[in-house]
Structures are given as C-alpha cells and as structure tokens.
Image: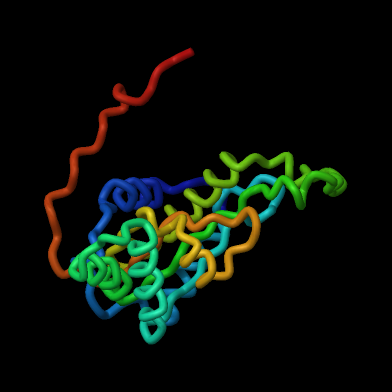
Amino acid sequence: MDATVSPELSDFASALIHSRHNVSPRRLDAPGPTPAQLQTILGAAAAAPDHGQLTPWRFVIVPYARRWLLADAFGLALMDRDPNATGEQIDNAREKAHRAPFLMLAVARLNDPHALADTPPRSHEPAEAEVGDAERLVSLGCAIQNILLTAHALGLGTGLTSGQAMASPRLRSLFGLGPGEQAICCINIGSVTRRKTPRLRPHTADYISSL
C-alpha cells in the first residue's frame, strides 16, 4: 500500500473505531458472517502487533451444531463452583452458549516456565520466554480488536463475553488447552436486532498525562 494515508481513509478509520460498540449476544441474531466475510474477519487478526512473531494466541470456532458441548461445560462449571446452584441458574449458564449465530473462544498462549526455561534465542529474534505474558495479552487484545472492527465494517454486531467459566477445568478439557494456554473470552458475531444507547466514552484528559 502507498505509505501516504488519504484523508478519506483516515476519516473512515476514525468513524469505524468510534462507532463500534459492544453488543450483547442476546441482541445478535442470524444471519452471522458469510464464509467469505468470516475469512476477512479472521484474517484481520494476523495484522496484530506480535513481538518475535510468536502468534501468542489462537481462536477456536464453536459451530452451532456443537454448541451443546459448550453448554454442558458452562453448566458443569457452574455446578463445580456452586453445588447449590438452582436448575434455573444452570439453565441460564447453558443458554449462554446458544445466543449468537457465530461464537469462538479466544485463547492466549502464555509462557510455560517449565517448557521454556532452557529455550535458546532464535538468531536475531527474542526467545519466547523473553516475550512476557503482558505483551502476549496485548497482542491478543489487538487481534481481537482487529476482528471486532472488521466485523463492524461489514455491518455485523460483535460482543465479548467472559466470566468464571473461562478458568474452569471443564472448559480447558473441552478446548484442549495446553500448558500456558488460557481461555480469555468468547467473541460473538451476528446481525444486530436492537441497538442500545451507546455508552459515554472517556475524555482524553481522563487517561492521558505527561511524564
């Protein structure tokens, strides 16, 4: 691409960023992304900053036909945390797996100190252990934001969901998470059925200071 950014592209990027809002999966319905749209959305993740080119994250799509497996994991995770959970609470936990037409799990690939303790550096690139977990999570966050913005540009709504189930052994087993891997959140994508009033954004003075 030409290194010179046109005013039109700058205006589009600003409008895209500032018009994106989180949409609850309850307000996402079919149709979800088409196969071609999905390839565009997922391809955007690869543009995230990635120190050492480690790709310290991955995503696992949960097809609608297999959502019952995720529903089981959510329900059992709640029962593990709270043996006194009511049937209604368990049903609510299970129902979360079925809301959006498209759902995938975002997984961070964090350092495994046992496996990486003796890993030598690769030529001019940093050793995997030298790229800390905070930096890896930043990379994942950027990959997720790229996904959200691309879906928004295609006219789709997106929402992130998490909760205590992300740390459940039930979820780890279902998704085959390895040592150092951590489930971070679910990414939900679909068509927006009802929009809410956008939340207020913080002013730059609220989060900017000078050294």
Image x and y of residue 154, in percent: 33, 68
Which is nearer the eye, 8 or 38?
Answer: 38
- Quadrant of residue 160 within the rendered picture: bottom left
Does any portion of residue 202 appear in the rendered image? yes
- Quadrant of residue 85 within the rendered picture: bottom left
Image x and y of residue 195, in percent: 14, 60
| Colouring scheme applied when the structure was drawn | rainbow
Which is nearer the eye, 110 or 206?
Answer: 110
Which is nearer the eye, 58 or 177?
Answer: 177
Which is nearer the eye, 90 or 60?
Answer: 90
Picture residue at 31% right of the left edge, 27% below the top: 204
Picture residue at 40% right of the left edge, 51% below the top: 9
Q: How many marks?
A: 0
Picture residue at 45% right of the left edge, 65% below the top: 105
Q: Residue furthest front?
A: 84
* Up-down relation of residue 119 to residue 161 (above or below): above
Q: Which residue lies furthest to the bottom in this view?
A: 65
Image x and y of residue 139, in percent: 55, 48
Image x and y of residue 38, in percent: 43, 74
- Left or right placement of residue 123 versus residue 31 in this view: right
Q: In which quarter of the image is the N terminus?
A: bottom right
Picture residue at 32% right of the left edge, 72% below the top: 97
Does any portion of residue 34 appear in the rendered image? no
* Up-down relation of residue 7 to residue 192 (above or below): above
- Left or right placement of residue 130 versus residue 200 in this view: right
- Quadrant of residue 99 within the rendered picture: bottom left
- Left or right placement of residue 159 versus residue 145 in this view: left
- Left or right placement of residue 126 versus residue 142 in this view: right
* Up-down relation of residue 91 to residue 128 (above or below): below
